[in-house]
């Protein structure tokens, strides 16, 4: 065998130093954990504060609750009136504050408690959705005027008050809250 042929055979034969290594694409991929812990869920959850009042209108509350669930928003109850530990919006970040209507008479203590909660949310620039008889209470608390025309609810933004006429308008307002960043 010639020297040239022997050199070619040596090049073709694998050596101890040459080991088979798969390409970067063929290597196994690492997939992170898929199960989220309760802490992970709580940290990333978007919340909407819902004011719980005496004599709340169940149909409004159920509709709001259903819409919040559809948008993956967690309900953060805020209790006013007797038994509450003090009127305040929780320190947790909120996407919005929702005040449903009530069939009960609003006592001065409950009115002041609700006003305090609404002012606190307005200072944090949290969107506020008020329905039926809660509309004048919310407008009075933040010192704004009602929108022109008849409306079933209002949405208070940073600088505007929007009148909502139909249930679809209210659903859209909750969808907008869900899309906004928590404050």
Image (cartoon, rainbow, N blue to C red):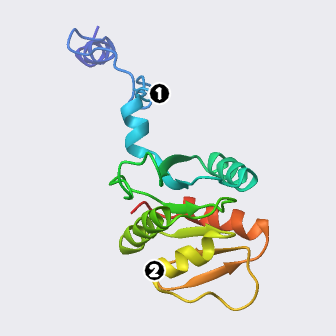
Mark seen at residue 34: 1
Percent across and percent down for residue 78 are 47, 52
Badge 2 crowding class, 10 Å Cα cut-off, few under 14, some 14 to 19, many 20 or more, is some
At horizontal 42% and vertical 22% (from top left) the residue drawn is 28
Position above or below: 170 against 59: below
Residue 103, located in which quarter of the rendered image?
A: bottom right
Q: N-terminal of the two: label 1 or label 2?
A: 1
Looking at the image, residue 70 sits to the left or right of residue 142; the answer is right
Residue at image point 59% right, 52% down: 54
Judged from the image, the secondary structure of the residue bearing numbered disc 1 is loop
For the N terminus, the quadrant is top left
Instruction: Give the alpha-carbon distance from disc 1 to disc 2, as whole Å.
Output: 44 Å
Q: Nearer the viewer, mark 1 or mark 2?
A: 2
Considering the image in quadrants, where does the C terminus appear? bottom left
Between residue 104 and residue 147, name the one nearer to us.
104
Q: Is residue 60 left or right of residue 109?
A: right
Residue at horizontal 36 percent and vertical 52 percent from the top:
92
Q: Is residue 141 above or below residue 46?
A: below
């Amino acid at each position: 065998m010639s020297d040239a042929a022997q050199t070619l055979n040596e090049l073709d034969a694998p050596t101890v130093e040459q080991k088979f290594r798969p390409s970067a694409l063929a290597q196994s991929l690492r997939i992170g954990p898929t199960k989220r812990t309760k802490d992970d869920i709580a940290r990333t959850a978007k919340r909407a504060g819902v004011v719980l009042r005496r004599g709340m209108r169940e149909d409004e509350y159920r509709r709001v609750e259903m819409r919040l669930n559809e948008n993956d928003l967690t309900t953060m109850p805020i209790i006013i009136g007797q038994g509450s530990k003090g009127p305040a919006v929780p320190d947790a970040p909120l996407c919005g504050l929702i005040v449903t209507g009530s069939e009960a008479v609003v006592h001065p203590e409950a009115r002041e408690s609700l006003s305090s909660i609404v002012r606190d949310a307005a200072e944090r620039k949290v969107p506020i959705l008020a329905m039926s008889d809660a509309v004048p209470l919310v407008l009075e608390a933040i010192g704004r005027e009602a929108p022109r025309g008849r409306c079933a609810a209002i949405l208070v933004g940073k600088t505007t008050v929007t009148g909502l006429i139909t249930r679809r308008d209210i659903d859209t307002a909750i969808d907008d809250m869900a899309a906004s960043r928590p404050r």
